[in-house]
């Protein structure tokens, strides 16, 4: 069982980037110093560790369900495949994404369960899932999603206040009753074949906040101004959180949606199958992705300094996610130039894979 595996250690001789450690208990208690730490992390690198979040057991349980679903026979998994239209929910089969400008197929699998489906179950809002997922909807999936949602909502409220927005502004773009592409995800990547270089290509996250539980290494960030990738070391009990495109745009660029990718785990960990789980908070489908300049002088000032098009995307959150998800699909791949552009996020650094392609 993945959760019971004793992992070979994460090597100490690979380039690793430190992240600030934010204490969720202190954030909930309104601690000023911790709030400042979260703000620094969210505006500088856009990534941080979160401790005392209380979701470890639920994350582990979701991983076990993900393991059951992603080890079903292929024909069973394909019944729930995401499809090429840019849909977010269901199973992403291996080989369905183009992971570089040359159109190389990926090897990872995802189980993506919609927040809306989990909260409304047994009502179906977006789609159905394999029986093994349904069987654990109330015992496992819903508790993971509810607790993760509470964590992300708490962080959003702190960021809302630091951005000088009227109370509840960011929350109004993330109402749980409005349909969204928010989801829980379980990722499986194979033990590293010798020529395997990339599991998930360099990207910014599509939504607002990501809350990730990693067992083995492989996640890498390209910090602002850096020319090389750095691993983010998985630390038991600490989640890895990051800002996505929607918050970058809402904040006029103040919050950083940093580029990252997933490569095979370093050192001896490469011999293991890689499993990770996460929760992705995304805005309501109909929320327009634009800087909220009319509600915060801070945001107005920041957005005015930036590229005007960037903070007036003209897209709503659903369109943004569909363009990015659909643009990566292998069946939609046409040529390197198109691959580089079609699924772009808010990154301010060129995609390093694009440069070498
Ligand atoms: O598995 C990981 O470490 C990160 C996955 C990721 O970046 C994503 O799903 O957006
Ligand atoms: Fe990501």
Image (cartoon, rainbow, N blue to C red):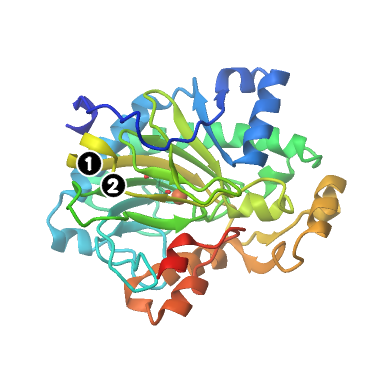
Residue 47 in which image quadrant: top right
Q: Does the numbered disc 2 mark a residue whose Cβ is under 8 Å from ligand 1?
A: no
Q: In the orientation shown, which residue stands out farthest toward the bottom?
A: 334
Whether tag 1 and tag 2 are in contact, CB under 8 A, the answer is yes
Residue annotated with mark 1? 270
Q: Earlier in the sequence, mark 1 or mark 2?
A: 2
Q: Residue at x 28, y 37 (%)?
A: 63
Residue annotated with mark 2? 264
Residue 312 in which image quadrant: bottom right
| Residue 119 in sight in this render | no
Q: Which of 3 and 16 is in front in this view?
A: 16
Q: Residue at x 47, y 67 (%)?
A: 355
Q: Nearer the viewer, residue 287 or 48?
A: 48
User: Tag count in the figure?
Assistant: 2
- Image spot of residue 101 (x, y percent): 39, 72
Above or below — where is 299 with respect to 215? below
Neighbours of disc 2 within 10 Å: few (<14), some (14-19), many (20+): many
Question: The C terminus lies in which quarter of the figure?
Answer: bottom left
- Image spot of residue 317 (x, y percent): 59, 61
- Image spot of residue 258 (x, y percent): 56, 49
Looking at the rendered structure, the secondary structure element under dot 1 is helix
Q: In this view, does 129 lie to the left or right of 228?
A: left
| Residue 196 in sight in this render | yes
Q: In the orientation shown, which residue stands out farthest toward the left?
A: 73
- Image spot of residue 163 (x, y percent): 77, 40
Q: Residue at x 36, y 24 (%)?
A: 236
Q: Nearer the viewer, residue 144 or 191?
A: 191
Above or below — where is 289 with respect to 172? below
Q: Residue at x 40, y 51 (%)?
A: 123
């Amino acid at each position: 069982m993945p959760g019971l595996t004793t992992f070979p250690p994460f090597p100490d001789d690979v380039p690793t980037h430190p992240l600030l450690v934010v204490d969720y208990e202190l954030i909930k208690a309104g601690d000023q110093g911790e709030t400042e730490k979260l703000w620094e992390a969210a505006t500088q690198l856009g990534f941080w560790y979160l401790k005392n979040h209380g979701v470890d057991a639920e994350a582990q349980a979701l991983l076990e369900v993900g393991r059951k679903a992603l080890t079903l026979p292929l024909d069973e998994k394909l019944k729930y495949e995401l499809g090429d239209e840019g849909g977010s929910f269901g199973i992403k089969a291996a080989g369905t994404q183009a992971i570089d400008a040359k159109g190389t197929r990926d090897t990872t699998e995802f189980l993506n369960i919609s927040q809306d489906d989990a909260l409304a179950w047994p009502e179906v809002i977006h789609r159905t899932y394999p029986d093994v997922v349904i069987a654990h909807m109330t015992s496992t999936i819903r508790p993971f999603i509810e607790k993760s949602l509470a964590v992300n909502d708490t962080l959003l409220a702190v960021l809302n206040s630091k951005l000088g927005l009227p109370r509840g502004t960011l929350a109004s773009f993330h109402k749980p009753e409005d349909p969204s592409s928010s989801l829980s995800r379980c990722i499986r990547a194979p033990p590293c074949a010798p020529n395997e270089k990339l599991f998930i290509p360099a990207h910014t996250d599509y939504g607002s906040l990501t809350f990730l539980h990693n067992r083995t290494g492989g996640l890498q960030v390209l910090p602002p101004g850096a020319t090389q990738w750095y691993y983010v070391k998985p630390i038991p009990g600490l989640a890895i959180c990051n800002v996505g495109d929607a918050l970058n745009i809402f904040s006029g660029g103040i919050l950083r949606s940093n580029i990252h990718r997933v490569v095979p785990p370093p050192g001896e960990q490469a011999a293991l199958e890689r499993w990770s789980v996460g929760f992705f908070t995304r805005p309501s489908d109909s929320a327009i992705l634009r800087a909220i300049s009319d509600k915060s002088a801070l945001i107005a000032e920041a957005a005015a300094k930036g590229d005007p098009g960037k903070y007036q995307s003209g897209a709503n959150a659903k369109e943004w996610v569909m363009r990015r998800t659909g643009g990566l699909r292998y069946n939609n791949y046409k040529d390197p130039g198109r691959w580089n552009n079609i699924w772009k996020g808010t990154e301010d650094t060129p995609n390093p894979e694009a440069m070498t392609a």
